[in-house]
Amino acid sequence: MASPSRNRPTRGRRGRQSKDRRSNRNLIQPGGYVVAECISPQRKRQKNNSKDNSETPSKDKDQHNEGAETSALPTIPCIVRVRGKGTTENTNSSVKSVMDVRRLAAKDHVKDDVRMDVESVFSLGEGKRSVSSITCAIIDAVMAKIEGGFSRLAEKDIYSIFDDEELLFDDTDSFDLDRAVKSTLRLSKLNDKAFQGTSEARMYPLFRDFVMLVAFYVQSHMNSLSAKQRTGAIKASPHLILPYSRGDFKPEGSDDRTKIDGALALCKLSTHVGLQDTPKYKDVFAIQELKWFKRDPQEALIQLVEYTRNIYANQDHRRFAWGLTMCGTEIRCCLFHHDGVRVSPAMDFADIGGIRRLVTLLVNWSFCSLDRLGYDTTMERIQESNGWEISCPNHDDKSKRNSFTRYVTTGTIMNASALFGRHTRCYLAKRKDGRSDESVIIKDSWSLPRDLKKSGKQESVVPDESHNLRLITEKFSGKDVGFSYPQAISSGSVKFKDGSKYVTDDTSVIYGYDDGDKEHMYRVHRRIVITPVGHFIKSVRNEAELVFVLADAMECHNAILTECGLLHRDISVNNILVIRNEGENSRCRPVRGLLIDFDHAISVDQQVSGNGARSGTLPFMSIHNLEGARGKRTALDDWESLLYLICWLATFGINSDDRDDMDDEMVEEIDKWRYADMSTIARAKRSHMDSFANFNRLVLSGFQGKYKMLRVLAIEIYNALFQHKGCEGAFHRERTIATASNKYDIAINEMVKGMQGILGAQQPAPGFDPLVARNNYKPQILENLLEATRGAAKACEKFLDIISKEDDKEKTSN
């Protein structure tokens, strides 16, 4: 890093490299949230079509916009949550590739979030009892065919089978029964020394023949039943599990270049038994990972964890996912739930009992209802518009216990791009019945319940966004409050119909464990219908608009804290929206800000000191939040997050069209806020904030020069938070620093503070912590902070008023 005395690096000296590096930061990092550049498929098509143009395509995230604007949805960095187990290396000197960081995360999850040899995986894949006689008949027929084929084939024929290249690499979609039996025999002999070291690519054609064998008997048996027998025995329509034609390929919908070894599709019962076309991730039922040796189940599982997140990202109606690993002759079934992975005991092709278990699994999958396979039956695909019809619960309707409103989506704002967690998805939608033409946001997530006995969480009260938004709506509805706030039209737990009754969709219903199972997090599937609709923060057109939006968002934050007693706890780039004003007043105040996402908000009266709970978005988390401080979170932590947000946008650009090329050294310090574990990031921030000299040299120096107003606002907020009289700086130190009276003592203390800034990586010394002491001055600091944002907004109004008058003069003169 350049010393303070050196000239500032020339802008753009390594701009191309820096820009490329920023465009590939779709990173999943253990230990917190990270920012990910997520580009919608629609935007990808626009980007590919404009490769030959000189204009740089926008990388902003899909906006919360009205239906007419959905044809040009850009993309922005979106926030991806991963569980905080383990850490990654501090990559200050260089940034790890996307695949490197994803693999680290996958290893971390396999180490901590996987339960091996869990028999309950099979019970979830079972159909209803009413079809048990049918499934047993099909399983017996398949096994009779396999065992009969084994007995007819002499030992000498086995090796000739392995030399049959046509059998291995025949990609025709026709199914041959005898070939399928031979393939099953070959699979049972993979452990023989004569076949060791053969390419894994030779395994998938064998396995796909076996899958088609089972599907053939499922279809044949169902076709042999009369219509009366079929209707009387089966309530849910059965389906076929069929393989795709190719192995070792990249499915459409992947956001990287990785290839999968194989995959299975869920097809209608009437589908021709044969190989399916090359898949898209939006159609994949389960991914398969192949390894030649039995000793590789851990490695196979790591790769399966890496790939399966693409199923959630491309399938909006997916609640949980399946996968298969095949290591030599051993196959394991993997169930991916919201907080981990369950892996079945091995099903060994070398043992007839293992083959029967796998046949049973495939047959039971064929007769499972869609909800048991991981699909959301309250969502229906609209083929004409490629949107969804979604059933949303009405919490306000007291007349009916199970009351729902149907909405039709007009766009997808956010998908579930992470493998574990809440799987939050957001849609732009309108009512299906046409009673209102107003656009709304539907937020769908798997959140923790307020009932701690079920969740097992050690926090005093689990945040509940439905409850929080209802409280906010009731408090401000019908009042002229002077700012925008999120309003809940309806919210509640998702319920689906199981026979004649409605069942609440939660993890106990899905996975079969009871509320007392402490090894699993209990989650509830919830939907909230929210208004007003806004645009993502990076849709601002200039610096003044950003200042207006931030000022309004913090006015909303202050009012909700004062009137509702709720602390937001996640001020970040994705949680502040832009609402555009109309009319004459829009000339001097073109936009308003809207604070959203109260998933982490909690009542200030219900917080408990000493639990060290951490929540938020990694680059913007306050120092005490990163450190898991034992005290309560306060409004000052949220304002500290706002400071980091301003610094972030002023460094990287307020939108994709307003981003300058920059040298790596210019962003090296602020990169420390995301590419490390939480404790390392906290130490870096303490160093950056400990003195104004450090803040200016390490943070402000990276601001793009055109952002004059953001620079002033950042300094004002910094001074209010970190240079308040009586609690200056950010590092722990002895109290004499704050109370020194002799001018030489003051000079010595200032030198000590400077040294602590330079040696920021050292462990903080015990004693006086300015970040704790500032809470004693919280009312005065909060007043100073609000004055800073209000003053900045008034200055921007004055600036725009001057510009408007100048424009009017120019028009008049012309």
Image: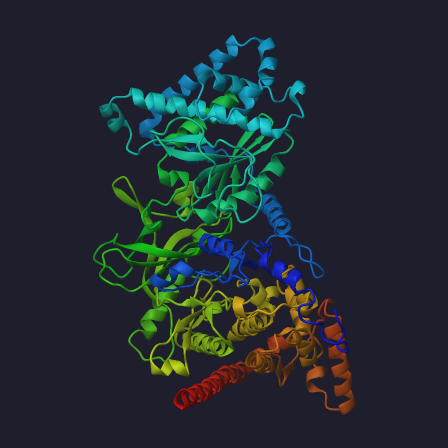
Task: Identify whether 732 is placed above or below 412.
Answer: below
Residue 539 located left or right of residue 472: right
Q: Nearer the viewer, residue 743 or 519?
A: 743
Percent coordinates x, y for residue 537 in the rendering: 47, 69
Percent coordinates x, y for residue 521 in the rendering: 48, 49
**Residue name at image x 25 percent, y 21 percent:** 226
In the picture as drawn, the residue positioned furthest to the left comes out as 399
Residue 571 located left or right of residue 387: right
Could one spot residue 345 in this view of the protein? no
Percent coordinates x, y for residue 527 in the rendering: 36, 56
Task: Identify whether 812 is placed above or below 189.
Answer: below
Q: Nearer the viewer, residue 310 or 513?
A: 310
Q: Quadrant of residue 766?
A: bottom right
Task: Identify whether 775 is placed above or below 23.
Answer: below
Q: Quadrant of residue 484?
A: bottom left
Percent coordinates x, y for residue 52 in the rendering: 54, 57
Task: Tell me the quarter of the image containing the N terminus.
Answer: bottom right
Q: Quadrant of residue 70?
A: bottom left
Q: Nearer the viewer, residue 400 or 351?
A: 351
Task: Tell me the quarter of the image containing the C terminus.
Answer: bottom left
